[in-house]
Image (tube, helix red, strand yellow):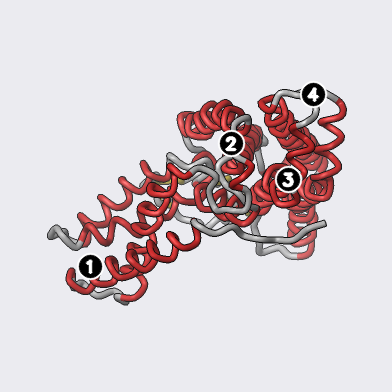
Amino acid sequence: MFHKALWLRNWKQGKYVIALFWLSTLYLLPYRYYSDALHKAEYLRETTDTYYSYHLSGDSPTFFPALLLIGLAVILIGWERHNQTNDFLWSMPFKRSHLFSSKWLFGAVHIFSTLSVNWILMYIVYNTTIHAEYQSFTPFHLYFVYTIITLIAVYTLALFIGTITGNVISQGALSYILVVFPLYIFQLAFPFFALHVDLSQKEYNNIYNKSSMYIENTSTLAPLTHFNINYDYQPQREAIQDEYGELHVEPAYHHIPSAWTLLSPIIYILICLPLGAYLYARSPNEQNGKILLYQKLHIYFSICTSICFGLLGSEVFTDGSKSILLHYMYFIGVGILTYVILQWLLKHKLSLYAK
């Protein structure tokens, strides 16, 4: 997996995505941090009736880089199936599992090195700007640790999806869906099932908030979803109660998820990495171009996808109606329609011509 030829090949395929990943993180993290410092310093210097404030939402600077990592995984695996270069690659004197490991290591090294450089640059900005007068950099240390683990988990999951899908579109789409799936599936499922029980609005909100947090913690993005760093030195500011019920009186009020939330991305890495290497070594090339490479997965994929689209149809087309019958009509109708379309799509190969 450390062979120079494999590293150079991966670089040749993914260099533009890697370059964009570096540039985007440098812009979204240290550059914006520096620009905010300049803006705050100028604002405080030119006006008297003002105050210092800063806010960082953990998932905002990482959403686009996460999409780029999915794109990198698609290029390194899905694009090889698309242009049939994996036949040549597999004929080389390397184990297929090592080929997969080299692709993972290539992405993981760039994730770690990119964010480490951003970490250092932000610390330099912190020490040389107005931020040092009002902030502590401790929460940012935790933020970068959480971000590195989270993005490696996203990349690992996307590579794994590439071992069971047969084309670039299905790999990219399924990777994105599975990354955000735990964040949104509960928003679709809970209102549907809540129709069957008599809940007051207060009970509904309490159950929804508690349960959604547990479901969201199964996502690769769990450590960053609710990660917030806030500084607000407004003299007249009253105590702030955040969405988690915590009361903040001091100007520094952060929400840093428990280290236990890191278990989710770590588990994704520990499962998807060896399983991906195993499946990559046994990929059936004759199924290239299809949505899924393995026939046995078709039924599970069809049922799960149909249920999800059925819930989505029930939520969208009922327009807030409380009629159980109407919800079931759209749920069953959209679900059946989705199942029929998928059965047709799963039998055909997607032909994308490439030189």
Q: Which residue is mark 2?
A: 153
Q: Which mark is residue 129?
A: none
Q: Amino acid at mark 1?
A: Tyr
Instruction: Identify the mark nearer the N-term, 1 or 2.
Output: 2
At horizontal 64% and vertical 57% (from top left) the residue drawn is 51
Q: Which residue is mark 3?
A: 80
Q: Is residue 252 above or below residue 4?
A: below
Q: Which mark is residue 93?
A: 4
Q: Which residue is mark 1?
A: 328
Q: Secondary structure at mark 4?
A: loop
Q: Position of residue 158 (x, y in %)?
A: 60, 43
Instruction: Identify the mark nearer the N-term, 1 or 4.
Output: 4
At horizontal 71% and vertical 51% (from top left) the residue drawn is 82
Instruction: Decide if residue 206 is in sight here.
Output: yes
Residue toward you, 53 or 83: 83
Q: Secondary structure at mark 1?
A: helix
The alpha-carbon separation of the residues under discs 1 and 3 comes to 43 Å
The alpha-carbon separation of the residues under discs 4 and 3 comes to 18 Å
At horizontal 50% and vertical 61% (from top left) the residue drawn is 345
The answer to whether 1 appears left or right of 226 in the picture is right
Report the quarter where the N terminus lies. Answer: top right
